[in-house]
Image: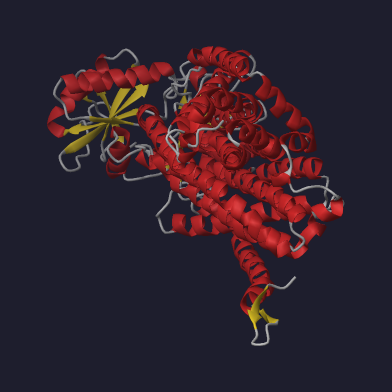
Amino acid sequence: MESSTHDARPDGHTHRRRRRLPRLLRLVLPPLLILVWLLGAAVGGPYFGRVDEVSSNDAAAYLPDSAEATEVSHLAPEFTGSDAIPAIIVITSPEQIDEDTTAQITDALEDLSSLEGVGSEISPALPSEDGLAVQAFVPLDPDADLGAVTADVADTLDADLPDSLDAHVTGPAGFSADLGEAFAGIDGLLLGVALSAVFVILVLVHRSPLLPLIVLATAMSALCVALLAIWHLADAGVLLLSGQTQGILFILVIGAATDYSLLYVARYRDELRSHRDRAEATRAALRGTIEPVLASGGTVIAGLLCLLLSDLRSNSALGPVAALGILSAMLAALTLLPAALLLCGRVAFWPRRPLPHDEAGTAPQSEADEDTVLAAHGAWGRVAAAVRRRPRPLWILTALVLGAACLGLPQLEASGVAQSDLVLGESSARDGQVALGEHFPAGAGSPVQVITDQDDLDAAAAVLLADDDIDAVTVSAEDAPSGSAAVTEDGVQAAGPPGTPAPEPTVVDGQVLLQGTLADAPDSAAAERTVRSLRAELAADGSQALVGGVTATAIDTNDASVHDRNLIIPVVLAVILAILMALLRAVLAPVLLIATTVLSFGSALGISALVFDHVLDFPGADPAVPLYGFVFLVALGIDYNIFLMTRVREETLRHGTAEGVTRGLAVTGGVITSAGLVLAATFAALGVIPILFLAQIAFIVALGVLLDTFVVRTLLVPALVLDVGRSVWWPSRLWRRGAD
């Protein structure tokens, strides 16, 4: 249908003047938009297999520069002469290890130096006191693929050692390898599960074979383009990427792009019933969709960018990475999807093609009375009518139930978990850590590191030696055969045969490096207490000593996470509240929406805590779990309130508040429910990655989204608005109109 205007002629007749530019745009713009997105997706697609080139799972890399553990990690290689990542080899035997077996172990360890990524300075086999195990320290290249290198080490040992011996690769390198292996399923398994779940939901909701494919193509194009931009920014050092951030990015983009697409699809289908011309339907659908999508996406982006305030770089890095993903999802849903549906027209909805009202014999929705609208929307019309009948008892009862669920919050132990518990399921490094603790000091290979002034060496050593939870103390010494010398109450000891003079400690810029072997596993709560105590005692002595190492890194990470949580949550609330006020042109409605979303978050967290403790038997949670859960649930959960309330406001302008609420709830019920199911399914897909943090985020966010979808948006918010009446729009003109 061509667009035209009528010009009057001198004889009184009119002639049609075709507007060629709009017709040209209609013919050229949609294919051009599709082509641009397809090119972006084609270029960005191959980067799925290259994310590991620009990402790191090293916890120390994400600490703030001011953290003690960070400073120590930067300075320590200057004392040791190497920045290699240590792998601890633990070899156990059911019986005493004799000299012949020790010789075989020594030969097997020597063979490891020929492997790519393994350093040559492999320690000799160190026997345990019980004679049932030996350990050795193997340096690995930090730039190598730790997963592949540790696998080669394990395979070589298995081939060279007798069957009666069990070999484990543990320590920092072993745990890093386990994490890398756990994250390896992100590109394939995670995306496959998420996309399959979304496809099934879309087919069931729309009962169309073509429409789900168009929506998924939109979501995947958004993800490919986002990944293309993020990869190059990470390669340039502008952004930091980790396996955790990558997994969240994938899920967030797929879920958000699908949600925004569903909102547009629902509006476009309605407009196809009001307009014969699909171009007119497209323009009308965009007018009705662009504000809620921009508001929703803007809210999520604003919430995510609040993470830039974080001290922990794993949090601050997620903010811009995820924000770029949401921006790509918004653009795809507002450009690529409308262009594709414009070209397909009603065929996209086959076999349930929407017909114009004059052909279907129905009145336009805007002209129909309330009963007709409610009847036309089936179950959601009946829900809207039920909410309108008794709003006050309904919202009070709903709020009480959600409040009761919040009582589980104190059981959420979000104070950090041991490194050995980060990977769910089998873990070779965890098994090695257990074997290490059975035969050696559990902290062997992951010592506490203390860098202090040379003049304070004796005082710092005395603090370490006085601690019963420190089994041994050494000082870095270049002249010692092993690169370090033991320290006792009598000072630095000889590192060679009796009578050999004590080596001089390595001094760098007037400082020395002490290392203390912890009696407890380095990722245990007992080891953390020891390190905190050492820091306090060294500070009390007036020392400027820095305490680092694996345990100190975990402590500083947890402390930074707690700081971030306490700072960012109030900021996110304030930012989202301001956005809602600007969107709804009111004060009271945004406050109610924020309050209901926070109540929903508390309920999800409380229920999750009970499930984690009593059903799944998780060992605890990272301090960042509540923060991530809050950011995602409040920013994403508020989306459904935005989708609902923008439509309610639109209907209120025509019909008043009470009828506007029932119409808005009935009309948006199907699409918001579909969007909620899709987002819950995509976040639940994170659970296929065997990482404790991601499994907990998957459960909390999926549960919270379902609560927002079926309880908060369906019952609590509409009932509250109906009970409050037109005052909910205070101080906007809707409030001043004086009609409910």
Q: Residue at x 67, y 57 (%)?
A: 337
Q: Please, is residue 409 above or below residue 119 in the view?
A: above
Task: Give 161 or 303, whichever is nearer the viewer.
Answer: 303
Which residue is rendered at x = 43% and y = 51% of the image? 239
Judge left or right: residue 307 versus residue 642.
left
Q: Position of residue 483 (x, y in %)?
A: 31, 38
The outermost residue toward the front is 11
Relative image position of residue 39 (x, y in whole percent) = 63, 67
Q: Position of residue 311 (x, y in %)?
A: 34, 37
The image quadrant of residue 461 is top left
- Image quadrant occupied by the C terminus: top right
In this rendered view, identify the residue nearer to me: 672 or 6: 6
Residue at coordinates 57% horizontally, 48% vertically from top-left? Answer: 293
- Is residue 731 shown left or right of residue 162? left
Q: From this viewpoint, which residue is outermost toward the bottom?
A: 10
* Front-lying residue, 153 or 299: 299
Extreme residue in the right direction = 351
